[in-house]
Amino acid sequence: MSEDDADFDPNAPPLFLTEVDKQVLAQTDEEYHYHTWEELKQIISENRLETLKRKPSDLRKYLAWLTRIKATYGNITNYVLQERLHWIPLPPIAELPASDQVPTFKSRNPHPFADPDDYCILKNDWPYGLENGILHLVIWLKTPISVKPDTGEITDTGRAIVEKWIDTTFVQRLMQAGHTDGGNSSREKALNKVLWFKNWTRLQSVRGLDHIHVLLRDIPEALQNEWMK
């Protein structure tokens, strides 16, 4: 057992474990199958987000890390706010019980993605188990994207807002950077390098702090750094 594993109690995991998580924990890294780009496209298009998984050793390290983070910061949301985003939430709403409180922030624009100061693009510290060449980003927002109250899935309105931003930020920038021949073929090439999804509420390890996931394939490091500046 590694030092990371020693901090993780499998009988008291620091977050909800899906059936897929439990299967992965029973595997070795040698038995693990990395997600390919084509598999990711199918999983996202079919909304089977619960099937996304981490490499066994990474999942064990992630769970051990979560245990330590919760012991130090109380929860992972506090850690992300204090150490990764450096955002200061507005004071709690006095009329709401503590269980119903979620972080809110002063924003420049109430609409998601309308102002760059209201969101932050970071590399995922604990990405899923993806084949080489796939970059996993997390985009954190001060202004929440609308979800269905019964399922926690993104609404059609929310999806349209995200897709417009994805197109402007990633697809069009990829076309400018490397697909300059114009026409539909250029756009298709760029589109095939970008995937995104928003986990249902039940699958989120950081709840109450809105975010989406973006996957990029075979992107030059200079361009990666441009997005994450």
Image: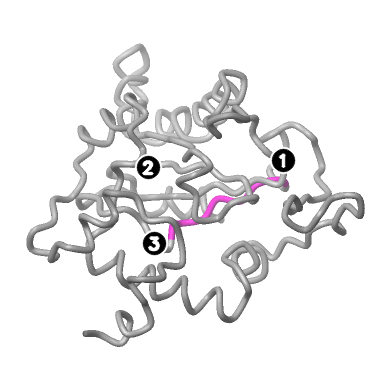
Q: Main secondary structure of the magenta part?
A: strand
224 falls in the magenta region: no
Q: Name the residue beneath numbered marker 1.
A: 143
Query: How many discs mark residues in the rendered view?
Result: 3
Q: Residues within 10 Å of mark 1 (few under 14, many from 20)?
A: many
Relative placement, left or right, of 68 versus 193 is: right
Can you name the residue that lies furthest to the right here? Answer: 94
Q: Name the residue beneath numbered marker 3.
A: 126
Where's residue 154, x and y in %? 55, 29
- The quadrant holding residue 26 is bottom left
Kind of residue indicated by mark 3: Trp
Can you name the residue that lies furthest to the top here? Answer: 183
Rendered residue at 43%/41% (across/down): 214
Mark 3–mark 1 distance (CA, rounded to whole Å): 24 Å
Vertical position of residue 36 compared to residue 114: above or below: below
- The quadrant holding residue 31 is bottom left
Relative placement, left or right, of 90 versus 11 is: right
Mark 2–mark 3 distance (CA, rounded to whole Å): 13 Å
* Front residue (pair 51, 16): 16
Q: Name the residue beneath numbered marker 2.
A: 215
Q: Secondary structure at mark 3?
A: loop
Q: Which tag, 3 or 1, sits closer to the chain's start?
A: 3
Q: Secondary structure at mark 2?
A: strand
Vertical position of residue 125 compared to residue 73: above or below: above
Q: What segment is highlighted magenta in the picture?
A: 118-124
Answer whether labels 3 and 1 touch (C-beta < 8 Å): no
Rendered residue at 33%/71% (across/down): 10
**Quadrant (top left/top right/bottom left/bottom right) for the N terminus:** bottom left
